[in-house]
């Protein structure tokens, strides 16, 4: 069974994807270098943000509890992966096997990159005498931020391919933006990540999504040329 052609052309996004992916990759590498070399201005910003949000976490316990629920259940990486797994199943049932493989591979690569960088950088998380939450393993990059970016980035791309426009598209964009930004905020607010950990997760996740889009478009062009 062949994949149904998209109702709107994805050519503009696919054309820009390699360039955007390259830019995001460069920014990710620059940030990684600054973190690995403990660049003082960046470390200073991280500490200022962390101390401020930690103070807020103690001043507003109800908000802290809300952040815990959002980060541990709604936007947890396993919740995001489950959503992507359902997406893969739906794509397979619709006969869109190439898209299903792309989503599955991108999700797996994201997890591998995340764990590889955590092991390589081995950055310590913020340490507090009065923590409001806890997390394990190394800090850089934020797995929550990276996984959410990959998940919602892929879902937006797929929805756009399906022709989602108008109010539906605006709602999808808003939900994705709130989720991706929101999960990053929860990690910093709860004192388990530095801001640059979250920024790295956003950059790396976006680079993976644009790389996946570029790879899919290249495959389609090769098929068309061969056909």
Image (cartoon, helix red, strand yellow):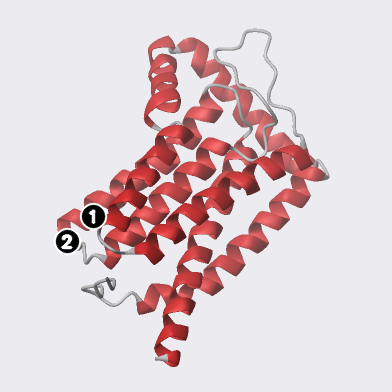
Dot 1 crowding, Cα within 10 Å, few <14, some 14–19, many 20+: few
User: Which residue reaches farthest front?
Assistant: 1
Which of the image's four quarters has the C terminus?
bottom left
Q: Residue at x 40, y 88 (%)?
A: 224
* Image x and y of residue 127, in percent: 70, 18
Q: Residue at x 70, y 44 (%)?
A: 116
Rendered image quadrant of residue 137: top right
Q: Residue at x 68, y 29 (%)?
A: 47
In the image: residue 16, left or right of residue 26: left
Q: Is residue 15 above or below residue 127?
A: below
Residue that badge 2 annotates: 166
* Image x and y of residue 177, in percent: 37, 47
Q: Is residue 26 visible?
A: yes
User: Which residue reaches farthest right?
Assistant: 37
Is 98 in front, or is 134? 98
Q: Is residue 15 visible?
A: no
In the image: residue 12, left or right of residue 140: left
Residue that badge 1 annotates: 170
Q: Is residue 173 above or below residue 125?
A: below
Q: Is residue 203 above or below residue 102?
A: above
In the image: residue 22, left or right of residue 97: right
Label 2: element kind: helix
Is 195 in front, or is 48? 195
Rendered image quadrant of residue 103: bottom left
Which of the image's four quarters has the N terminus?
bottom left
Contact? badges 2 and 1 (CB < 8 Å):
yes
Q: How many marks?
A: 2
* Image x and y of residue 120, in percent: 78, 42
Dot 2 crowding, Cα within 10 Å, few <14, some 14–19, many 20+: few
């Amino acid at each position: 069974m062949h994949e149904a052609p998209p109702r709107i052309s994805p050519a503009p996004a696919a054309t820009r994807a390699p360039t955007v992916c390259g830019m995001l990759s460069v920014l990710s590498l620059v940030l990684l270098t600054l973190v690995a070399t403990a660049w003082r201005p960046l470390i200073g910003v991280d500490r200022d943000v962390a101390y401020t949000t930690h103070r807020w976490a103690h001043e507003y316990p109800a908000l802290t509890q809300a952040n815990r629920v959002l980060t541990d259940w709604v936007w947890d990486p396993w919740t995001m992966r489950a959503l992507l797994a359902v997406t893969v199943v739906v794509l397979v049932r619709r006969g869109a096997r190439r898209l299903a493989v792309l989503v599955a591979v991108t999700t797996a690569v994201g997890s591998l990159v995340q764990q590889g960088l955590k092991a390589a950088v081995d950055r310590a998380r913020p340490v507090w005498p009065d923590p409001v939450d806890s997390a394990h393993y190394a800090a850089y990059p934020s797995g929550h931020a990276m996984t959410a970016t990959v998940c919602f980035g892929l879902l937006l791309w797929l929805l756009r391919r399906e022709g989602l426009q108008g109010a539906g598209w605006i709602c999808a964009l808003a939900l994705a933006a709130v989720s991706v930004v929101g999960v990053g905020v929860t990690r910093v607010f709860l004192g388990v990540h530095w801001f640059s950990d979250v920024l790295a997760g956003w950059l790396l996740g976006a680079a993976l999504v644009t790389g996946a889009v570029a790879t899919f478009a290249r495959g389609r062009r090769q098929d068309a040329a061969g056909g």
